[in-house]
Structures are given as structure tokens and as C-alpha cells.
């Protein structure tokens, strides 16, 4: 398991099987998961100061992560 906070496994612990099934069946959902992981890694790197970014950029990344998480949650509820 990753040491990066806010992984999808942490955010949706009860939905692991549904996430796996949707990822294999829905290319858009799979792309959302990839995008979420990439943005979450950027947020983590910014928060831990491994990558220097402005506060505005960091806030934008957090907003983007939140929007992706919301869309993933909507798709999980609809499945």
C-alpha cells in the first residue's frame, strides 16, 4: 500500500470490488482513476514540499482531486 494519503482504497474502502469491476468495464471510469491517482500524487508532493508549487497551484490541485473523487463516487453509486 502506498504511503500517499487519500488513496482511493482509503477513500472508498467498501467499494474495492466495484472499483475493480468498473475499471475493467468502463474506459472513462478507468481514466478517472488514473487521473485521480496522478493528481493525488501531485497534491502529496506539494504538501510534503517535495515539489515546490505556489499556494494557488496547490489549492487548484486539491480542488481537482475533490472533483475527480466526486465523479468517481457518483459513478460508484450509479453502478
Image: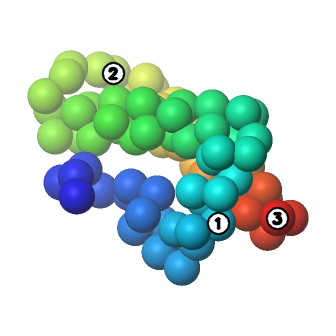
Q: Which of marks 1 and 3 is nearer the N terminus?
A: 1
Residue 70 location, x and y as percent?
69, 54
Instruction: Decide if residue 12 is on the left or right side of residue 5.
Output: right
Can residue 50 be seen?
Answer: yes
Q: Mark 1 and mark 3 in contact? Answer it, CB < 8 Å.
A: yes
Q: Name the residue under label 2.
A: 54
Residue for badge 1: 18
Residue at position x 74%, y 34% in the image: 28
Q: Position of residue 5 (x, y in %)?
A: 29, 56
- Front residue of this view, candidates 48 and 37: 37
Q: How crowded is mark 1: few (under 14 residues within 10 Å), some or many (20 or more)?
A: some
**Which quadrant of the view contains residue 32?**
top right
- In this view, which residue lies farthest toward the right? 78
Q: Quadrant of residue 15?
A: bottom right
Disc 2 vs disc 1: which is toward the camera? 1
Looking at the image, is 55 positioned above or below residue 6? above
Kind of element beneath mark 2: loop
Residue 43, position as x, y percentages in the image: 35, 37
In the picture, residue 9 is in which quadrant?
bottom left
Residue 32 located left or right of residue 4: right
Q: Mark 3 points at which residue?
A: 79
Q: Are marks 3 and 2 in contact (CB under 8 Å)?
A: no
Q: Distance between the residues labelled 2 and 1?
A: 36 Å
* Distance CA(mark 1)–CA(mark 3): 8 Å
| Observer-nearest of 45 and 24 | 24
Nearest-to-viewer mark from 3 and 2: 3
Amino acid at each position: 500500500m502506498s504511503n500517499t494519503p487519500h488513496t482511493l482504497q482509503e477513500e472508498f474502502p467498501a467499494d474495492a470490488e466495484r472499483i475493480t469491476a468498473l475499471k475493467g468495464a468502463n474506459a472513462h471510469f478507468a481514466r478517472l482513476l488514473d487521473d485521480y491517482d496522478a493528481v493525488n500524487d501531485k497534491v502529496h508532493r506539494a504538501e510534503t514540499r517535495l515539489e515546490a508549487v505556489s499556494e494557488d497551484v496547490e489549492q487548484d490541485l486539491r480542488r481537482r482531486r475533490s472533483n475527480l473523487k466526486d465523479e468517481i463516487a457518483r459513478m460508484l453509486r450509479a453502478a
